[in-house]
Image (cartoon, rainbow, N blue to C red):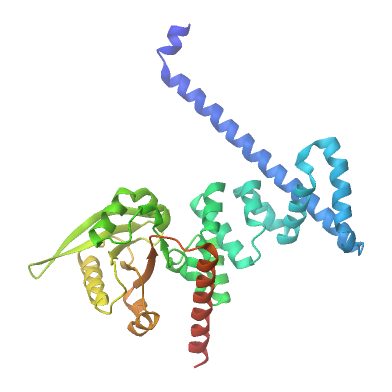
Amino acid sequence: MKEKISRNPGLVNEIRNLIEQARSQVAATVNTELSMLYWNIGKRIRTEILDGERAKYGKQIVATLSRQLTEEYGNAFSEKNLRRMLQFAEVYPDKQIVVSLIRQLSWTHLIALIPLGDPLKRDFYTQMCIMEHWSVRQLRERINSQLYERTVISRKPEETIKQELQMLRDQDKISSDMIFRDPYFLDFLGLSDKYSEKDLESSIIVELQRFIIELGQDFAFLARQKRITIDNRDYYIDLLFYHRRLKCLVAIDLKIGEFDAAFKGQMELYLRYLEKYEMVGDENTPIGLILCAGKNEEHVELLQLHKSNIRVADYLTQLPPKEILQAKLHKAIEIARNRLSEEASE
């Protein structure tokens, strides 16, 4: 009998797949039921504290409950976990939203999202996590790397952010402002203080997988030093990618110095060539990304690069302390929003 089965590996693999599928379904069902239970517990505790006007006794209520429940049901109902459940119900008071969330995210994902104080930031991470199928570890890494603050969308007015998140949630459509970042973290390349553009490019190719993770999961690598010929002259695009959701080519130009106005003309030439000779089917027009070691914001603003579908971003090969980076990002967001507000009032 054993010999007959060993001669039919297809049968064994098929049964293995059935077992794995059943296990996944059971795990998903258990996660959904537990998450709903935790929300109901949090909601009930919240009602007890608020309706009974016993907010100042909230700590005692949670502590007492925890002692009783832990004795009967174990550490899943520790004081710390009960507070998480309470916070879960406070952050997501709408049951319908909760039902939708727990079908797509695990309780451990939700634990990472709940402490985020800014609702827009929390919604951004939630929708990106669902769209890109982040693991819990990936979600935490992106929160710690301040992905939201580095994404272009964070610099837009709040109403615009809400609309774009709503579009992603309801129509599964994502704007380029939710994809491109500034700055990009390239500390994993291990570059020394002095390096050339060739060193930068070669290091990216060696660490291509990690570079794509930093760019975003929908980027697909197409070419390095893509040669294009115009009027018998050869030009080379440093890196060429394709973005699946945006349905467009993305040309990346690497610069080791600060942004210069001349970079615009060079990138425009690349993009018009790609648009004329490389676009196929229903693709959207190509996007250019110039990565430099620094940039002057006024240069970028006056050149109106967005009209040419060009983006400019800094890259960091060595990360500053978290507090300094956080302050810098928050200042950039404030400046960008103030500028947009001034333009709207003119």
Give the camera-side residue of 323 and 63: 323
- Would you say 78 lies left or right of 262 here? right
Examine the rendering and report whether any part of residue 75 can be seen: yes
At x 50%, y 67%, the residue is 325
Spot occupied by residue 12 in the image (x, y as percentages of width and height) = 47, 20
At x 54%, y 57%, the residue is 144
Spot occupied by residue 113 in the image (x, y as percentages of width and height) = 63, 56
Examine the rendering and report whether any part of residue 156 can be seen: no
- Would you say 125 lies left or right of 234 here? right
Residue lying furthest left? 232
Give the camera-side residue of 340 and 94: 340
Residue lying furthest front? 193
- Would you say 288 lies left or right of 232 here? right
Spot occupied by residue 82 in the image (x, y as percentages of width and height) = 78, 49
Give the camera-side residue of 212 and 335: 335
**Vertically, is 165 above or below 11?**
below
Give the camera-side residue of 9 and 188: 188
Q: Quadrant of residue 191?
A: bottom left
